[in-house]
Image (cartoon, grey):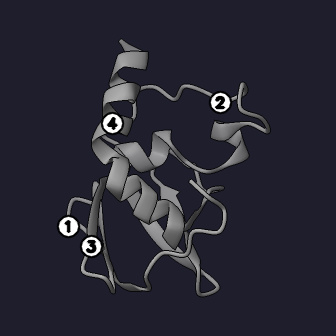
Amino acid sequence: MSSSFSPPAVTSLRLSSDKQQLTISFKDGFEAVLPAELLRVESPSAEVQGHGPDQKQLVRDKQHVKITAIEPVGHYAVRLIFDDGHDTGLYSWALFYEYGKNKQSMMDAYRAAIS
């Protein structure tokens, strides 16, 4: 994804009642419905992504992880707090948009990597 990408404004952010799915609606009508598992295993944190392309960590056993809190960070991102204690990733609107567009291929790649 190009660093110059500017997604449409976010119009709503909704956490499901079971806290395992986050729905992000954008001004252009696109809606990203993202499982907590994907958001946790693809966290933008250094803990998961590392500090270089070959340092990404494979996070396992997060099928039942829940999002326990959502904290706004300025007007461009949120911090998600997970019930396993992970809370260091900043999820920008651009990242949510990208994950929403690529959710299936990202989940397929993750499932292949852990099998």
**Amino acid at circle 2:** Lys
Separation (CA) of disc 2 from disc 3: 29 Å
**60, above or below 31, in the image:** above
Classify 10 Å Cα crowding around label 3: few (below 14), some (14-19), many (20 and above): some
Q: Nearer the viewer, mark 3 or mark 1?
A: 3
* Residue at position x 47%, y 54% in the image: 82
As displayed, is residue 6 above or below residue 42? Answer: below
Of the residues tagged 1 and 2, which is closer to the observer?
2
Give the image location of residue 101, x and y in percent: 34, 55
Q: Earlier in the sequence, mark 3 or mark 4?
A: 3
* Gap in angstroms between the C-alphas marked 1 and 2: 31 Å
Give the residue type at disc 1.
Ser
For marks 2 and 4, give the one nearer the viewer.
Answer: 4
Q: Which residue in the structure is indicated by mark 4? A: 105
Residue shown at 40%/58% (left/top)? 67
Residue under circle 1?
A: 17
What's the residue type where badge 4 is placed?
Ser
Q: For residue 39, say whether it is visible.
A: yes
Query: Neighbour class for label 1 at 10 Å: few (<14), some, many (≥20)?
Result: few
What secondary structure is found at the residue carrying circle 2? loop
Label 3 sits on residue: 30
Q: Which residue is mark 2?
A: 56
